Each structure stands twice: as C-alpha cells, then as structure tokens.
Image: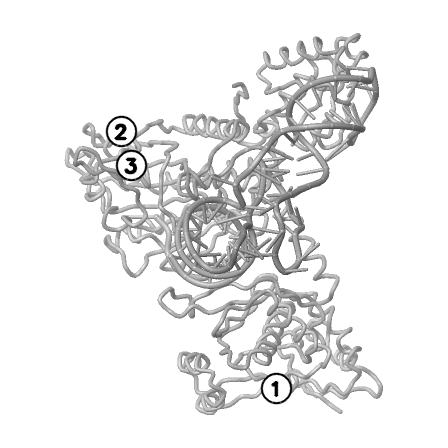
Amino acid sequence: MSITIEGQQIDTPKGGSIAEAFQQALSKKQLKRAVVARCNGNLLDLSAPVPDVCAELTPVYADSEEGLDIIRHSASHLMAEAVKKLFPTVKVTIGPSVDNGFYYDFDYERPFTPEDLEAIEAEMTRSVGADKPFSRREMSAQEAKDLFAAQGEDYKLEIIDDLGADHVSIYTHGEFTDLCRGPHVPRTGVLGAVKLLSVAGAYWRGDEKNKQLQRIYGTAWADPKSLKKYLNQLEEARKRDHRKLGTQLDLFSVHEEIGGGMIVWHPKGALVRTILEDFERKEHLKRGYELVQGPLILKRELWEKSGHYDNYRENMYFTEIDEQAYGIKPMNCLSHMLIYKSRIRSYRDMPQRYFELGLVHRHEKSGVLHGLMRVRSFTQDDAHLLCRPDQVQDEIVTLIGFIRDIMDLFGFQYRLELSTRPEKSIGSDADWDRATEALRGALEAAGLEYRVNEGDGAFYGPKIDVHLVDALERSWQCGTIQCDFTLPERFDLVYVGEDGARHRPVMIHRTILGSIERFLGILIEHYAGAFPVWLAPVQARVLTVTDAQKEHAEGVRAALAARGIRVEADLRNEKLGYKVREAQLDKVPYMLVVGDKEVEAGAVNVRWRDGDDPGLMTIEEAAGLILSAAMAPFERGGMRYSFSTTF
RNA sequence: GCCCACGUAGCUCAGUCGGUAGAGCACAUCCUUGGUAAGGAUGAGGUCAUCGGUUCAAGUCCGAUCGUGGGCUCCA
C-alpha cells in the first residue's frame, strides 16, 4: 500500500501503522501539516489497525489549535448525522467549530429536549464506535445542488448559490454527506471525547428577520482526559461567577419587584463601588479633568436636537409632567455640551475635559440582561473632551496611556479594537481619515497590539474599544474612545481661534472602565471575590478567642479605624475556628486574633487570608502592614499615587 | 424581542404517581469560654414567583405575566 502526501509517495511498512509511515517519511512539522490540512479518507489508506492510528494521531491533534478545530468540526458532522438519523425530517444548515467546541444549526418542527440531546449523544457514541472513514469528493456546484435537492436540504442549496463557486467539496462518513470545505479527521473513531452541552435558538444567517433554528452546542477534545479537564475548568469558572459571589459576599441583589437589569447595592458592594469611584475621581483630577454633573432627566426637545430621539428612542425611558415630556438620559454628553456652550471658549481654553460618573438608563432588550455585565441602569465613568483638531492626536495618545495604567493596576489582560467608518455614516472623508489616523497613530505610538474592525465604527465617528474577558471567557466591552463629528455640529459648538474666527472643536467621548457595574462584575470574577486590600470592603477583622478579650478587641478595632483602616470586630460567643472560617469565606484580607496572650502583650496575632501567618505584632505594626498592603499597587511604575483608603 | 430551561424558607437545594411542605447552612434562645476553616440542644421561619384554568384534590398538569439562566439578534 502507498499513500501520497504533499506530492510525495510513501509506502506503508508491513505490519506498521499509517502514522509510523508518516513519521518515517516526513519531518514532524510536515506530518502535522499533512494531518491538519489534508486529513481525510481519500488521502489516508487506513488498512492499518485503527486503534493504533487513532492513538498515534491523537497527540498530533491535541498538539495544535488547528487539530482541535478539525476534531470539533468533524464532531459537528457526527452530530448532524445522529440528528438526521433520529429525526429524519430535520433540515441541516451549518455546523462550524467554535472556541472549545462546535455547534450545528437545525431546522426542525419541534424544539429539541434535554432527552433528545442524550439520545443524540448516544447515537454519536455509536458512530464513533463504528469507526467509519471520512471521505472527500469534489464535484460541480450543479452536481452538489442536485445531490442536496434530492435530500430536501434547501439550506444547502442556498449556501451553494451563495458560494458562487464552480466546484464544491463534500464529505461523507457512513450514510451522512455534508457540503464542507474540510478538512476532517480520517475516521470517526478518533472522536472519543465529545459531549453535547446545550440547545439554543439561533437565526438563519444570524438575521433576526429569518427563521429561528435550533442550535446544539457541544465540545470535543482529543482524548477523554482533556474533555474532563475542560469540564472541570468550566465548573471552576462557574464558582467565580460574579452573580454567585455577589450573593455569597453580600455585595448586591436584583429584585423582580424592581425590574430586570436594576441592581441594588448592599453595604459591602456599595462600599467597593464608592472606593472605585473615589479612585477614579482622583485619577481624573490628577490628569487634568474637571468634575461635572448633569441631571438625570432632560427635556425631550433636547434629545430631538441631539438626534437621540430619532436614533435611540426605543432604548430610552421617558417621563412626563405638566404636559412636558422628559427623556431619562441614556448617555451624559448633552449636559456636558451645554457646559461648554455656557460661555465663549478661546483656543487657549482647549481642550476642555469634563468627567462625570453619570447614571444612565437604557432599556436593553430583556434577553440580553446579564448579572452586572449588561443592565438597564448603570454608571458610566464618562468624559467628553472638546479639543482643537490639532490636539486630537495628543489627547488620544494620553488617553491610551491612561487606559493602560488603569488596566495594569488591576492586572487585566485586555484586547483593543479599532473600528473604522461604516457604510451608513455622516461626516467628510477628511474628518474620518484624520480621526481614524489619530486613533491608529496613538495605538501604534503606544506600541500596543490591536485588531481592526473595518466598518464597525459608530455612524458619527471611528472608535477604539477595550474588551475584557469574564470567568467564562466571554468578552465584554469596557473602555471606549469615540470621535464624534455630529454633536459639535448639531449644537453649534465653537471656539475662537488665534485668527479671531470661530472654529469647530472635535468631541471625544470616552470611558475607562466603561460602566462601574460591568467593571465590578469583571473585577469580582478576576479576583474570585478576594479584592485587593485597597478595594476590600472590610480590610481587617478582629477575632476574639473568648469573651474575656472583648474590651481589648474593641480597642484594637478603634485604633485601626482611627488609622483609616476598614475594620470590624467579631465579638460573638463562638469558637475561634468558626470565626476564622467565616472571615475566610468572607475573603477578609487580614484576621487579627486576640486571646489572653495578645491582651497581655498589648498585641494582635495576624493571619492573612491566603494562609500566610505573620504572627504576633503590635497594633501599630499591624496597622502599618495593612496600610502598606493597601498602597502597594500604587507604588508601581507610573502609578505612584497618594491614595487614601479612609472612609 | 426570539428559542429553550428554570423560579419551593434569607442562602443552597430535596419533594416519587396530583393527595395539602422537607434538609443543611444562616437566624433566635439556652448550654458551652473553646487558640486559627463548622461545639451542642431547642425554636422560629413558606400565599411553593404572580394571575388564571383543569381536577373531588395542584408545589406537581395547562395557559398567561413577571423574573432568572444558556444562546441568538441588538449594543450610541
């Protein structure tokens, strides 16, 4: 037997496996490339014992993203096969691989139930056991259309038409044939670690106006061990879900009676918020911003003038009194512009930087609400920069540095995206070019990696978005820098130039954290609820061993509180072990134990929540330890900062 | 908004075939004064999300509404 790979003919050794043949004939890199790019039944003669082949190919797949992609894509074919077998009237559509798994969209007369999923998974397992080869065939588009028409697979016909290619390829394993570019695993036997996860609705071609299909999600790995590891990881990630921790740590709640997407902050959560907000105010003041504040509701006519009434009305809340309609603000820019307009601005006054922790309300669709991440009432750390055109570039460079400082402080990995001019947009080409280049130039100057989303900008200008990732690796937009050409026009904002003439300023909308709610949600997951000392709502808790130390403990608490430490005392009649356990579950950074020994020494015994045990120290030493831990993140690099933790 | 699932004590969850409500933690009282992740006893706590329907009988079956979750779409 011989096979051909990358134009090279290879003889399979007697009694040896295919993979062995590869390894003899090709370098490891070639082998990987061959398997990854060309794996299918046509190119592999699988007369060798299958378990050998699978066992030897598995590491090749597991080794690379491409390999895992192929496994997942092949798994989706297996799933489609199983679904068609169990539900013969189903129509298949598309089934790609995605991060960590795959899905396939089906059109079927009734919803799939969890029991259906089990049956489908069982059928897939049978198919894996049967170890059928995958084979590839190329044919003319018309031939393929006839083939799928005969099966009643209308969606495939549409896809072939849309491809616009003369020839297409199909893959077959067992009885199931699918339109597919490939590649696939050589045999179904390779897919020993597949699990179906959930069923969801999805629109055909992602368009809300099209028919809604049923999407089954699954995950697939090179081997059962990897699958198990992935499922465990998911489980671990769920433990740090901010919604779960929000309840456990008594930070916030949501109430049916109040309405969806509205957060109620409990004392500890509100305290963390306040610390974060206070930090931001100080950071902004330090960087040349001015703090401003506007009302929550503004006359409807103003929203008409700004264009929000026409473009954003369905997301806005309205109220009315004495026959005057008001819009509840979904963003903060309008009052900021009125501040700008409240007097004549000289070119010398530029840029104006207005910062507001602005509470906004947006009536998001009910289905998109998600814990703290997507809510209807939230606070933006919003600022508007009104600058001369020649200042735009510098302002954006400074802004990117600001964002980087803050993200580094929290230890976040983040992704930057530059979105350019969309088809429907306003403003001149020159304006767009200049603004887009300013954004791009600033990213380049900062030496940061970024992705470009062509045509994904707002209709009023290009933007840079900062994306953070939650515990389950879902990405959320946080910071944003947006250039705006419309509002300065609509509101006729001007400044008097050196030449004495009136000029149009450029407006930059920007946030650093995005929304306080969303950012806190991500922070909770990032730290798994164990906030750094400067943010922790309770920084230290004094624990008594017996009732006899109540007085001393109260003295310790008062002494630390006087130093600006957020401290509480647990004087309850409980065993020390019990109190330690509770403090640990509350993720309090420092536990200060006082028993008879400590009373006598006028000291405390310190325990850090991570298990570290610095031991006996004086009250002054303990206070110094806690305060320096609170300050530590600000000592780094350019973030040297006189931050007070006092409240 | 759409598809699917879910909603039982403050929290986490049981509740079989439709026969009138359970546990652990938390809370209260008492006992216990115990040195680094749960000491013991007793007790209180529920319009089973809401509204309507089927039934002799509904936490359980059906419908609607509200809310939550997984997705889709959207995201100035």
Give the structural element (helix, strand or loop) at label 2: helix
Q: Which sits earlier in the primary sequence, circle 1 or circle 2?
A: 1
Residues tagged 2 and 3 counted as in contact (Cβ below 8 A):
no
Badge 3 local density, few (<14 within 10 Å), some, or many (20+)? Answer: many
Q: Residue at x 53, y 72 (%)?
A: A95
Image disc number at residue A175: 1
Q: Identify the mark at residue A386; answer none if there is no mark.
A: 3
Q: Which mark is residue A349?
A: 2
SS of the residue under disc 3: strand
Chain to which the residue tagged by mark 3 belongs: A
Q: Are marks 3 and 1 on the same chain?
A: yes
Q: Chain of mark 2?
A: A
- Of the residues tagged 1 and 2, which is closer to the observer? 1
Image position, residue A436 (x, y; %): 35, 51
Q: Please state which of residues A249 and A57 is positioned toward the viewer in this rendering.
A: A249
Residue extending farthest to the left is A501
